[in-house]
Image (cartoon, grey):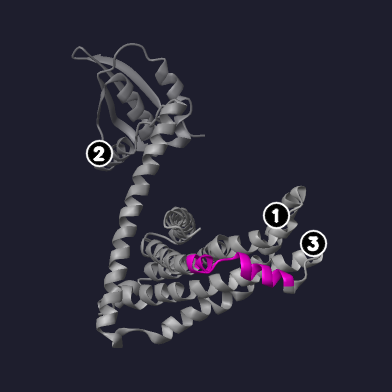
């Protein structure tokens, strides 16, 4: 059985000295910390010259006692001094968490931070929009740099592949508009005006707006994820190294594809929504398709169609630029890809709705109502 560590107190030259003997190791320390707590008075020096061995636990006990009593440690060889220095250097004070502010102050802080982030994002998005315009100008000046195959591929991804889901969504929206409109108008005996409601709201607003939201969810997120992954794998840096502009190679084909496909998809969505509304009017209200089509031609002005077609490419540009911009912001780790993809979708949908409200006020003021 190993003997426990011992110590003895003496007064030398008017100073209290604590001399340790034995081994300052885990196997021999035993109740040494409790015995040291019972030592009364100030201790000026700690003499470890008679200690046979000292490990990390022993060094920590001696260091803590010396720190509490303000004593200096003597009698160590080079290795023991190095061990004691390492133990002392590893000691860090516990950092208490900051005191939580009151809810009102915390709310103001979060609102302020959100406003700052929104301003910085808007500033960056405007700069990226300018860089996109410059890239389009450079491609227009040098047509050989236009990537025709990449653009056609984006036509297929953005447009053709989305026909099924956009058609289904638009058909159901047309059915819902007709059903809800008929229920409300039936109270006044004006079910026939359901045709007016379906025709005008789908061609003017919901056809293009819901298509933009769907494209933002499908294509905007895909753009952010694709470009963000290329940013992480340093493919974009490699493109710059070999003299290829990422804006011309990645952003221009995607933006052009969405801008050109959005009017077509919006018009397609509007027609399918009108078809869904007409089907419900035929089944529920007894309005035959011929009457429905004739009434649509009478009550829906051509201006409604132009309103939708004018808004569509603007929405498409916003969706593509927001997706590509967020993809270019990815840096660090793969978690950023998911975060930026989500941000791209939310940002695109928010901007589309804001622009739609602007267009509604603008067209109303110029008499296109």
- Front position in the image: 150 or 27: 150
- Front position in the image: 324 or 368: 368
Query: For numbered disc 1, what is the local secondary structure?
Result: helix
- Front position in the image: 272 or 83: 272
Q: Separation of disc 1 and disc 3 at Cα?
A: 11 Å
Residues at badges 1 and 3 in contact (C-beta under 8 Å)?
no
- Quarter assignment of residue 228: bottom left
Q: Separation of disc 2 and disc 3 at Cα?
A: 101 Å
Give x and y (percent) for residue 239: 31, 77
Is 298 a magenta residue? Answer: yes
Q: What stretch is highlighted in magenta?
A: 291-308
Residue drawn at (53%, 69%) of the image:
302
- Quarter assignment of residue 127: bottom left
Up/down of 47 relative to 218, above or below: above
The residue that mark 3 highlights is: 285
Give x and y (percent) for residue 199: 62, 64
Q: Few, some or many C-alpha atoms within 10 Å of disc 3 (few <14, some 14-19, many ≥20)?
A: some
Q: Tell which circle, 2 or 3, labels the residue nearer the N-terminal end.
A: 2
Q: Is the magenta stretch mostly helix, strand or loop?
A: helix
Q: Tell which circle, 1 or 3, labels the residue nearer the N-terminal end.
A: 1
Is 313 a magenta residue? Answer: no
Label number found at residue 77: 2
Label number found at residue 181: 1
272 vs 59, left or right, is right
């Amino acid at each position: 059985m190993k003997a426990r560590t011992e110590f003895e107190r003496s007064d030398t030259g008017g100073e209290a000295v604590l001399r340790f003997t034995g081994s300052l190791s885990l196997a021999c320390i035993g109740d040494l910390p409790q015995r040291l707590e019972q030592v009364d008075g100030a201790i000026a020096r700690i003499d470890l010259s008679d200690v046979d061995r000292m490990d990390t636990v022993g060094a920590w006990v001696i260091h803590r006692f010396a720190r509490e009593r303000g004593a200096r440690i003597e009698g160590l060889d080079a290795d023991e001094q190095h061990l004691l220095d390492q133990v002392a250097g590893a000691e860090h004070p516990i950092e208490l968490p900051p005191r939580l502010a009151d809810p009102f102050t915390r709310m103001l802080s979060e609102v302020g931070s959100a406003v700052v982030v929104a301003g910085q994002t808007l500033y960056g998005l405007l700069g990226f929009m300018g860089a996109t315009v410059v890239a389009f100008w450079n491609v227009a000046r040098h047509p050989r740099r236009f990537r025709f195959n990449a653009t056609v591929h984006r036509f297929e991804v953005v447009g053709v592949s989305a026909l099924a889901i956009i058609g289904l969504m638009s058909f159901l929206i047309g059915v819902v508009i007709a059903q809800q409109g008929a229920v409300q108008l039936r109270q006044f005996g004006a079910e026939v005006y359901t045709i007016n409601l379906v025709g005008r709201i789908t061609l003017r607003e919901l056809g293009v707006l819901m298509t933009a939201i769907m494209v933002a969810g499908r294509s905007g997120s895909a753009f952010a994820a694709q470009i963000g992954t290329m940013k992480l794998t340093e493919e974009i840096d490699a493109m710059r190294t070999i003299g290829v502009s990422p804006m011309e190679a990645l952003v221009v084909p995607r933006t052009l594809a969405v801008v050109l496909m959005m009017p077509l998809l919006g018009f397609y969505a509007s027609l399918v929504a009108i078809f869904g509304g007409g089907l419900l009017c035929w089944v529920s209200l007894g309005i035959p398709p011929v009457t429905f089509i004739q009434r649509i031609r009478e009550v829906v002005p051509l201006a409604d169609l132009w309103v939708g077609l004018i808004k569509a490419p603007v929405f498409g540009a916003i969706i593509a630029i927001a997706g590509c911009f967020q993809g270019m912001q990815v840096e660090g780790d793969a978690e950023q890809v998911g975060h930026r993809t989500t941000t791209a979708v939310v940002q695109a949908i928010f901007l589309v709705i804001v622009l739609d409200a602007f267009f509604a006020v603008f067209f109303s003021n110029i008499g296109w109502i």
